[in-house]
Structures are given as C-alpha cells and as structure tokens.
C-alpha cells in the first residue's frame, strides 16, 4: 500500500506540474492535450475517496468527497465549455483562476505527501502546503463559480431553471467553503505552530 501511495503521489505531482507548464507555454489556453491532462489528473483524485474509505490516509472521507465532487463537477463543465469564451472579471476568467489554483495546490500537495511517504519531510513543502491555501483556496472557488456562471449564463440567467440552479450552487459553496477553509486553518495551526 505504501509503495502504491508513493507512486500515486509522485505521478500526480509530475502530472500537475506538466499541466501547469503546458498551460503557461500555450498562452494560458487549454488545448485538447491540456484538456486530456486535466481530466486524467483531476479524475485520478476520485481514488482519494477510496484511499480515505480504506483508511490508507488520514483524510476525513466527507471532506475528501466534497472536495473531489466539487472539482469533478467543475471539470465536467470545463469539458462541456471547451474553448467557449469564459466570463471574465477585469480580464481574468474562471478557467485561469482554476488552472492556477488547482495546479499549484496539487503540485504542492502531492509533493508534500510523496516526501512524507519517503519519511523526508520538507520544511519548505510543509510551509507551502499550509500557507498557499490562504490565497489559492478562495481563488479556486472564485474560478469554479465563474465557470459555473459561464455555463449557466449560456441558458440565460434570471428567474428560471438555470438561474435557480446557479443560486443553489452558490448557496452550496457558501455553506461548505467556510467549513473547508476553517478546516485548513486548523490544520495550519497544528502543522505550523506559532514560534
């Protein structure tokens, strides 16, 4: 099991790193290969629900399920939207936010887990793991909501089914985001105690 987890974390750290480099090199555009790569990397996260259920990792299963499900939902929307122009705020669209937040977060997270499994804890990765989320988590959530908005806006938002669906999705984020964010802050206090 430990060898499997090492391989899993190493492959995903490399995969997410490659995806970030690919996205940057291609002018912050998600071409067909980039789309395949994000589907493979993000799709592999579904295994983390199994890892948690089997107690191979210490992550709570409910937290893991919520994180994985929300990302898979957004990933499906990215697949559907493809190269559709995404809704932008000040020239920054949801895809840019998601790609940067997801890739950086996952590169750090999987590298951190991999080094831990090697029993060679990196203070740098520890700091990154429990500090970068402060900015990347809200950035990712904002990007995810902009992607949801882009998709539903294509149906015309208002007092209609897409408008109500968007409201429900936003409400779900409002309910779960603070819990997930506070969970990470608790983890940070545990892992990075004040001097």
Image: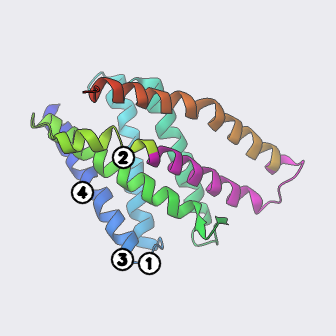
Question: Residue 35: where, in percent of width, then height?
Answer: 45, 65
Report the residue at 50% width, 56% height from top: 98
Name which of mark 4 and mark 1 comes first in the sequence: 4
Q: Residue 87 sits in which quadrant?
A: bottom right
Q: Find the residue positioned furthest to the right.
A: 159
Name which of mark 3 and mark 4 comes first in the sequence: 4
Main structural element of the magenta stretch: helix, strand or loop?
Answer: helix
Give the structural element (helix, strand or loop) at label 4.
helix
How far apart in space, not on screen, are marks 3 and 1 (Cα)? 6 Å
Q: Are marks 3 and 1 in contact (CB under 8 Å)?
A: yes
User: How dense is the environment of label 4, judged by Cα within 10 Å: few (below 14), some, or many (20 and up)?
Assistant: some
Q: Which residues are magenta?
A: 135-162
Name which of mark 2 and mark 4 comes first in the sequence: 4
How far apart in space, not on screen, are marks 1 and 2 (Cα)? 25 Å
Name which of mark 3 and mark 2 comes first in the sequence: 3
The answer to whether any part of residue 59 appears in the image is: no
Relative side of 51 to 62, left or right: left
Give the structural element (helix, strand or loop) at label 2.
helix
Badge 2 is on which residue?
A: 44
Q: Is residue 154 magenta?
A: yes
Report the residue at 27% width, 45% height from top: 110
Badge 4 is on which residue?
A: 14
């Amino acid at each position: 099991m430990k060898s499997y987890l090492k391989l899993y974390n190493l492959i995903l750290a490399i995969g997410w790193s490659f995806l970030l480099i690919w996205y940057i090199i291609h002018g912050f555009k998600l071409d067909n290969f980039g789309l395949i790569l994000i589907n493979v990397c993000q799709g592999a996260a579904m295994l983390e629900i199994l890892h948690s259920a089997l107690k191979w990792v210490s992550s709570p299963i409910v937290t893991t399920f919520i994180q994985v499900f929300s990302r898979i939902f957004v990933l499906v929307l990215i697949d559907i939207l493809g190269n559709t122009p995404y809704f932008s705020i000040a020239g920054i669209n949801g895809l840019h936010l998601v790609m940067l937040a997801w890739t950086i977060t996952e590169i750090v997270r999987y590298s951190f887990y991999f080094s831990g499994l090697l029993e060679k804890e990196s203070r740098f990765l520890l700091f990154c793991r429990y500090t970068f989320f402060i900015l990347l988590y809200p950035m990712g959530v904002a990007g995810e909501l902009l992607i949801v908005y882009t998709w539903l806006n294509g149906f015309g938002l208002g007092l209609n089914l897409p408008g109500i669906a968007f409201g429900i999705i936003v409400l779900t984020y409002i309910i779960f985001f603070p819990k997930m964010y506070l969970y990470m802050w608790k983890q940070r206090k545990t892992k990075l105690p004040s001097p």
